[in-house]
Every structure is written in C-alpha cells, then in structure tokens.
Amino acid sequence: MGRIIAVANQKGGVGKTTTTINLSAAIGEKKKHVLVVDIDPQGNTTNGFGIDKLNLENTVYEVLLDECTAKEAIIKDIVDGVDLMPANVNLAGAEIELVSSDKPSANILKSALDYVKNEYDYIFLDCPPSLNILTVNAMTAADTVLVPIQCEYYALEGLSQLITTINRVKKKLNPSLDIEGIVFTMYDSRPNLSTQVVQNVKEHVKQHIYQTIIPRSIRLAEAPSYGEPITVYDPKSAGAMAYSSLADEVISRKDL
C-alpha cells in the first residue's frame, strides 16, 4: 500500500514544489513506483514535469468534483517510475465549490486516492502555500507531512504555524497524521545565516530532521523551465545528488 506524503508549508517560496518534483523523481529512479498529485492551482509541479497544464482533459479539479476518477486523471510515466495527477488554474475554483457542496469536503481526495494507492510505493501531494480546503484535503489523505524549510530568518515562525495546523487536522480529521520530517532547502554555506537557521530549528523542534540539506543551486532553479526534474536535467549536479540522498533517507524511514 502506498505511503502518502503531503509536502506542505504555509510559507511560499520555500522549495516545496522543487522538493516534490525532484524527490519523487529521485525515488522513481530507485525502482519505486511514485504518484505525484499536484494540489496547487498554480500548477507549477505539472509544468515542472513538462506537462502543458492548459490542455488537460482531466485534472485534480475534476477528481475533487467527482467528474472523473483518479485513474482517469493520472498521466503515466512522465519520468522513470513517476506518474502525475496534474492541476491547473481551474483548481482555484474548487474551494468555493467544495465548501458549498452537500458532501463532506475534507475527505474527497482521500476517497479518490483509496482506489489507486495500492498501485504505488509513494504518493506525494504538493500542497498550496496556504491553509485552505485543498491543503486540508491533502493532510486528511496523507499518512505524514514532509516540511521543506528555507534557510532564512523567519523559518522557525513559519514552522510553528504549520505544526499547529497539522495538529488541528490530526485532532479533527486524521488521527494518524504525523510529521514525516523537516528538510532544509536553499542552503548557502557562505553566509552565517543559513548555518544559524539550521542550528536554531534543530534546537527548538522535536520532529525528525533529515540529514540531507538541499543547496541553493542555479541548476535546480533552471530545471523547471525545461520541464525536467534535476535528476534528468543535470544528474551529476549538486542538487541532483542532494535529492538522491534525501530519497535514500525517505525510503529508509519507511521501514522504521
């Protein structure tokens, strides 16, 4: 049965989508079967895998509105070992439509994924950078939440807000939800700030922190414009090696 991991942070620009794309691709290269679900109306994960989000018949939006099944929305083999359930701007209207629906709105994604999760080793849910019905759906469906944190001054503040959100979802909707781990992104070894942020977070949080730290990298920033994960765009780059290392850590934690 697939392990469902929501990649979430209420702060934008922390490397959430970059982590979803590159971690899933790195795990796929290790002979695991991975599904990525893009739950952000911006559709950056969809674009980052080279899929034209403007010309899609079925997306997460149609799945959430019960206009198609999860299987009908999945695009197979976008890279080795990875399938994608895409998203586009239509998803922005889902929150209003779900809230106004007579059906319980927080469990819709979970119910849809129940039909496909046994086909995958991992399912990654790329959440929007806000607490809305889409993020709640993701956390209700997930087993764990992976939290990317940018090495910047306000990192700890954003993390505490997210942990509060996770605890609320756990209390009311998903009692088994837990934090998968925290991964530091956009790390620059030159300024002291990055090192201080890492140390500060380690001193103040009890959650698991991955040993792998994702560096700030031009190659990582370039890869989405070519519609490729870093493992394809530049497999020998520091960014590719970092995500491969993170993939090993994520896989090893499955057996803990």
Image (spheres, rainbow, N blue to C red):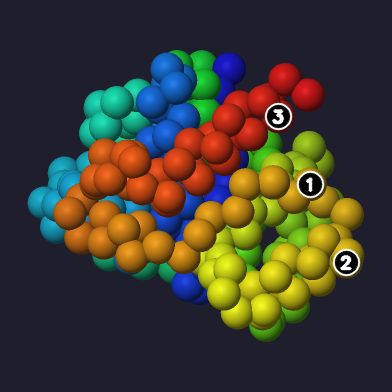
The outermost residue toward the left is 55
Cα distance, mark 2 to mark 3?
A: 22 Å
* Residue 252 position within the rendered picture, expressed as x and y whole percent measured from the top left: 67, 25
* Residue 179 position within the rendered picture, expressed as x and y whole percent measured from the top left: 74, 47
Counting residues from the start of the chain, the first of labels 2 and 3 encountered is 2
Q: Which residue is located at x 42 percent, y 17 percent?
A: 31
As drawn, the label of residue 208 is 1
Q: Is residue 103 above or below residue 68?
A: below
Q: Nearer the viewer, residue 104 or 131?
A: 131
Residue type at the position of mark 2: His
Relative to residue 52, is residue 29 drawn left or right?
right
Residue type at the position of mark 1: His
Q: Which residue is located at x 42 percent, y 51 percent?
A: 239
Q: Is residue 98 above or below residue 145?
A: below
**Quadrant of the rendered image containing residue 253:** top right
Cα distance, mark 1 to mark 2?
A: 12 Å
Q: Do the residues labelled 1 and 3 touch (CB within 8 Å)?
A: yes
**Quadrant of the rendered image containing residue 92:** bottom left
Relative to residue 85, is residue 158 drawn left or right?
right
Counting residues from the start of the chain, the first of labels 1 and 3 encountered is 1
As drawn, the label of residue 253 is 3
Q: How crowded is mark 1: few (under 14 residues within 10 Å), some or many (20 or more)?
A: few
**Quadrant of the rendered image containing residue 165:** bottom right
Find disc 2 in the rendering and name its residue.
204
For mark 3, give the secondary structure: helix
